Image (cartoon, helix red, strand yellow):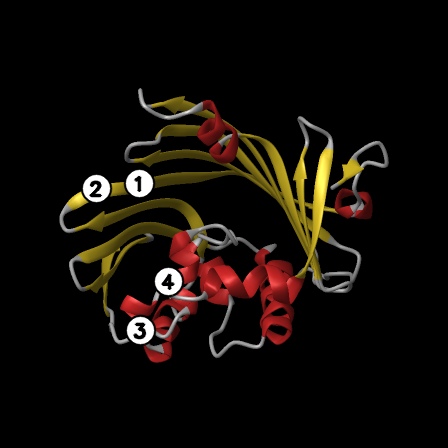
Amino acid sequence: MAFFLLSQIVFKSESVNIYIKDIGNITGIQEYYISQTKYRINEKLNLNREKLVSKFMEKYYAGNKSIIIDLDNDSVYRIDNYEKSYYVYKLDNYIRPIEKVEEKKKDVKAKLSIKNLGDCNYEIKFSFEGDSIISKICYKEIETNQVENQFFLNYNKKIKVDIDSRIFQKLGVFSINNPFVKFLMSDVVKKSDLEKILKIKGYPYTIELRYYNDTSLVYKYFSKLIRVENRGDVNVFKIDTTYNRK
């Protein structure tokens, strides 16, 4: 049995390959540092642009960027490690606007289906109107996810929504910019359906997520967990003093 100290940090590294229609293919590494009250995401991504995509859009989707969620200070930090600059937002002001579902989706309800494909693999499908999100996930037991589990329990208390935020961890899709997260945080999906996913044993090891709109592929995401370890370095949640606040 492992013991988890308050200062313990779990480090995860994932390789990702993301395709967004009319934007291009994004590849690279995402790193996560997780404690019970803080969460840092580092993204080191490159975009192979489709021909009409501007340099501005490339900067938006790719680059060397970080987000720090600090529940102790109720703050979110968006960091550009290339420009050595950062923005600071209050947690409530930053999270809630992007979790609002569009008015046209207000009365839409989603249908969830879960297939056990065997050998740790599951297919999870959300269908609503002409859209669908299909995720194939391999769940393996990883002991260190207890710390991340506690972060999401604390995160849920802070943002005060009627959903267990551990669903993000279980689906392997946590990003406060991810449209899938916004979808799950809305009233579109029943809480009882999401609880079915929480009952699946294990931790996302590989994730293949496809988002379709009226049968036309608009978003495809593939991620593989390549490294997990325990750390005790609390400095990972601090911003370099040479960076400029904007």
Residue on which the image places disc 2:
217
Q: Is residue 47 left or right of residue 227?
A: left
Q: Are marks 1 and 2 in contact (CB under 8 Å)?
A: yes
How far apart marks 3 and 2 lie (CA) works out to 23 Å
Q: Disc 3 on helix, strand or loop?
A: loop
- Name the N-terminal-most of marks 4 and 3: 3
Q: Earlier in the sequence, mark 2 or mark 4?
A: 4
Residue 152 found in image quarter: bottom right
Tag of residue 183: 4
Q: Are marks 1 and 3 in contact (CB under 8 Å)?
A: no
Tell me which label, 1 or 3, sits earlier in the chain.
3
Q: Secondary structure at mark 2?
A: strand
- Indicate the amino acid at tag 3: Lys
Precedes in sequence: disc 3 or disc 2: 3
Q: Label 2 is placed on what type of residue?
A: Leu
Residue 106, labelled with which disc? 3
Label 1: which residue? 220
